[in-house]
Image (cartoon, rainbow, N blue to C red):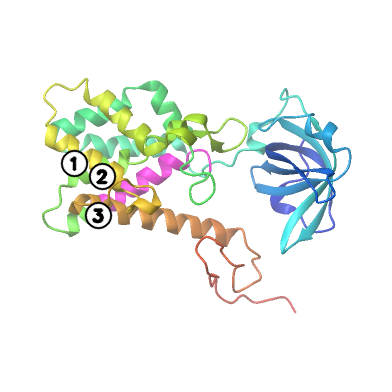
Amino acid sequence: MKQHYVGDMKAGDGVDDVFVLAEKTLAQKKDGNSYLTVTLADKTGSIGGVVWDDVERIAGAADSGDFVKVTARVTEYRGKLQATVRSMSKYPPDGIDPGDFLPASRHDVDQLFERLVQMTDGLGDPFIKALLKAFWADRDLVTRFKQAPAAKLMHHAYLGGLLEHCLSMAVLADKMARHYSGVNRDLLMAGAVLHDIGKVREFDYHTHIDYSDEGRLVGHIVIGLEMIDEKLAGIDGFPEDMATLLKHMVISHHGAQEFGSPEPPKTIEALLLHYIDEIDSKVNGVREFVASQDPGEAWTAYHRVLGRHFYKGKTEKAG
């Protein structure tokens, strides 16, 4: 039974437990001797590690993605925790509880999916409804959609995260469409559901969350367009202009080329989708970050990606 979790580690701790070897890199010091950097992970997060001794043997003992038995000492290096690894060996997956290593949504994914299906069944446009029904009729895709994370690190980075993110966006899209006149509600809802559908194949989430080969080489936007085209091919008479508008929403939802979108949003629905995605991803990401911080402090640590500290509010400290 697993005893030591990354999220509980403190400088000075001794560790002797099983982790996922998320990454490993063999490098050389200035004197020509080798050292190994590793990333160890479980459901609570990941920690960087370094191997100074017996490097070649330890480097060859396991591959990225393997479960490994590790003995290490936790230290602090440049303001971050680091594991100085003394030994590491491949650990057989038999008897491993996947729940110890992969973070998961706190919600019932079957209930989340049922709510999303009810929302899409209530759409008025027969072609958009038919397209979404085609996705929901694909049992393999639905299974993966319920399991997939929405990201590796930034937001909804846990099993079921993609479904949670898309449902939340669909709820926001419904409210936005009712608030602003002239918005094609059904098109916006379809964009909310399908904008990240390619992530079911972009990520590998068997032992830890990482990009698949297809994800690194192609990316979820292109994968998603391919998946949409496959379903559209089975729907007779689907309007070509509607298909183009939907695909534009998918390719533009990151907002700008420097953030991965080939085109910026050029319709009201695409613009709304981009900002709904920003709202939901940022709020979730910040909430997860705040939850990981010291509950006794009024401010979080510095968030490197967003470039700021977040204020949590003052708490009464025990005297």
Question: Which SS class for mark 2?
Answer: helix
* Residue at screen point 49% across, 40% down: 149
The amino acid type of the residue labelled 3 equals: Leu
Residue at numbered disc 1: 245
The amino acid at mark 2 is Met
Task: Specify the quadrant of the image occupied by residue 318.
Answer: bottom right
Asked if the residue under mark 1 is in contact with the one under mark 3, i.e. CB atoms within 8 Å, the reply is no
Q: Is residue 233 above or below residue 212?
A: above
User: Residue at image x 80%, y 39%?
Assistant: 17
Of callouts 3 and 2, which one flags the residue occurring earlier in the amino acid sequence? 2
Q: Which residue is tagged 2? A: 249
Q: Nearer the viewer, residue 36 or 140?
A: 36
Q: Residues within 10 Å of mark 3 (few under 14, many from 20)?
A: some
State how far apart marks 3 and 1 are (Cα). Answer: 12 Å
Mark 1 touches mark 2? (CB < 8 Å): yes
Q: Is residue 18 left or right of residue 275?
A: right
Q: Position of residue 58 (x, y in %)?
A: 82, 34
Question: In the rendered view of the protein, which quadrant contains the N terminus?
Answer: top right
Q: In the figure, 245 relative to 274: above or below? A: above
Tally of numbered discs:
3
- Callout 1 amino acid: Leu
Above or below, comparing residue 167 to residue 89 in the picture: below
Mark 3–mark 2 Cα distance, whole angstroms, equals 8 Å
Q: Which residues are magenta?
A: 158-174
Q: Position of residue 221 (x, y in %)?
A: 36, 38
Is 184 within the magenta? no
Instruction: Judge whether residue 165 is colored magenta.
Output: yes
Q: Residues within 10 Å of mark 2 (few under 14, many from 20)?
A: many
Q: Which mark is residue 271?
A: 3
Label 1 element class: helix
